């Protein structure tokens, strides 16, 4: 399964219709959640009752029936995730906190040249910046502050890619540098939040001075949301370039299996760790490596910076010491390169011998000398 994301350009009237549909889905979500909590009704019973609700609620009659069913399915998936210990208990969505709705089948949407027709909404202009390959399955409309996007999920026939022999690599994630590779390559950490934090704080102060419920407060809120969106998009761009670099040049990519949720409990480093988005880098690298016939391995992180990558001796050092000096074998090496080599060695111990292209090896929860100049390019 692949997902394509394209920008929508609705007219002013279509923008209002999209916003109205989003708000109706939010209210339906809250209504179904209230029923699940207070009446102990299950998903299948709620789905059967949607037809009756549609007849009695004039707002529900303005949205496609399959969109309503997907709202119920989305709520049920949230409950299933909670019961499996993978997420939080579902919460009621307040106004402005519901960002997407989905057409789960082709009957609700279709493509016509440079436009897309959505049932109960109409035909909207779309910028298709690349061709869609595969059989379309679902379509999700997403609101990003004042912009609209459509995400189309397609089903493709998986083919084993034919790739040239590529070397393995160990990746040490960090804050000073986003990643340091075992071959000495350094992927820089641009620290986008740190660059924009003063602007964001100023916009937050401006918003706090506006009267609640006023138009000026709403304008200040949108300005603040756009500032955060810029940081988010800068991070995503950097992560896609870094993951492309890794997947394109290496066959086996070894990461530390870091417990990011536990690490951010250190309030001195939490902001820097979240700004580095380590988990996003690993996630993007995984699917890109898989599409190229490679794989990733997650290994135990403990002691990778303290152990000598040549002789295995433990050399204690705190975070302020950036160079590894081994008194046993005399190895002098950048601290992070030494750690990356240890990570690679641990990963190769787990890698089975294969003659065919290898799939992604997922081992639990996804959570830093240079051969190529930075910044990296690609996608």
Image (cartoon, grey):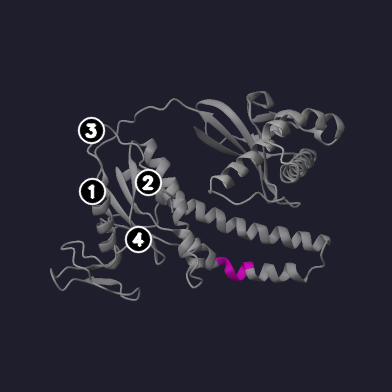
Q: CA distance from mark 4 to mark 2?
A: 20 Å
Q: Nearer the viewer, residue 201 or 94?
A: 94
Verify CB contact (< 8 Å) between mark 1 and mark 3.
Answer: no
Q: Look at 24% across and 38% down and name the residue there.
A: 165
Q: Earlier in the sequence, mark 4 or mark 3?
A: 3
Q: Nearer the viewer, residue 356 or 197?
A: 356
Q: Look at 74% across and 52% down and name the residue there.
A: 94
Q: Earlier in the sequence, mark 1 or mark 3?
A: 1
Foreground label between 4 and 3? 3
Q: Which span is picked out in magenta?
A: 196-200
Percent x, y for residue 289?
37, 41
- Which residue extends farthest front? 40
Residue 349: which numbered mark, if any? 1
| Quarter of image, res 83 | top right
| Quarter of image, res 120 | top right
The answer to if 312 sits in the magenta stretch is no
Give left or right: position of 79 versus 207.
left
Which residue position holds label 4? 368
Verify CB contact (< 8 Å) between mark 4 and mark 2.
Answer: no
Which residue position holds label 2? 363
Instruction: Please say whether residue 70 is visible from this viewpoint.
Output: no
Secondary structure beneath label 2: loop
Q: Earlier in the sequence, mark 4 or mark 1?
A: 1
Q: CA distance from mark 3 to mark 2?
A: 21 Å
Q: CA distance from mark 4 to mark 3?
A: 30 Å
């Amino acid at each position: 399964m692949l997902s394509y994301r394209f920008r929508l350009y609705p007219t002013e009237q279509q923008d209002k219709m999209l916003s109205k549909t989003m708000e109706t889905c939010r209210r339906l979500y809250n209504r179904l959640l209230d029923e699940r909590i207070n009446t102990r009704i299950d998903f299948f019973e709620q789905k059967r009752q949607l037809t009756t609700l549609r007849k009695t609620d004039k707002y529900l009659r303005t949205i496609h029936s399959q969109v309503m069913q997907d709202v119920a399915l989305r709520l049920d998936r949230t409950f299933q995730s909670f019961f499996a210990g993978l997420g939080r208990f579902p919460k009621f969505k307040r106004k402005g906190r519901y960002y997407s709705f989905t057409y789960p089948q082709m009957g609700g949407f279709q493509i016509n040249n440079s436009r897309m027709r959505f049932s109960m909404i109409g035909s909207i202009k779309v910028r298709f910046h690349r061709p869609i390959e595969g059989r379309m399955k679902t379509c999700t409309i997403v609101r990003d502050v004042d912009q609209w996007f459509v995400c189309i999920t397609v089903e493709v026939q998986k083919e084993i890619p034919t790739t040239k022999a590529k070397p393995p690599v160990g990746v040490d994630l960090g804050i000073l540098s986003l990643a340091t590779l075992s071959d000495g390559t350094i992927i820089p950490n641009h620290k986008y939040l740190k660059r924009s934090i003063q602007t964001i704080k100023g916009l937050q102060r401006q918003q706090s001075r506006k009267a609640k419920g006023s138009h000026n407060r709403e304008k200040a809120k949108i300005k603040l949301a756009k500032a955060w969106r810029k940081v988010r998009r800068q991070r995503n761009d950097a992560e896609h370039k870094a993951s492309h670099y890794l997947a394109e040049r290496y066959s086996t990519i070894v990461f530390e299996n870091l417990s990011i949720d536990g690490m951010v409990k250190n309030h001195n480093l939490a902001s820097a760790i979240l700004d580095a988005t380590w988990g996003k880098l690993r996630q993007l690298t995984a699917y890109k490596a898989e599409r190229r016939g490679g794989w990733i391995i997650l290994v135990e992180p403990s002691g990778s910076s303290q152990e000598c990558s040549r002789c295995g001796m433990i050399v204690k050092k705190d975070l302020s010491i950036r160079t590894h000096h081994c008194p046993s074998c005399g190895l002098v090496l950048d601290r992070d390169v030494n750690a990356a080599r240890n990570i690679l060695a641990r990963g190769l111990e787990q890698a089975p011998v294969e003659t065919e292209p290898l799939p992604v090896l997922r081992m639990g929860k996804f959570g830093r000398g240079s051969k190529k100049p930075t910044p990296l390019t690609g996608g």
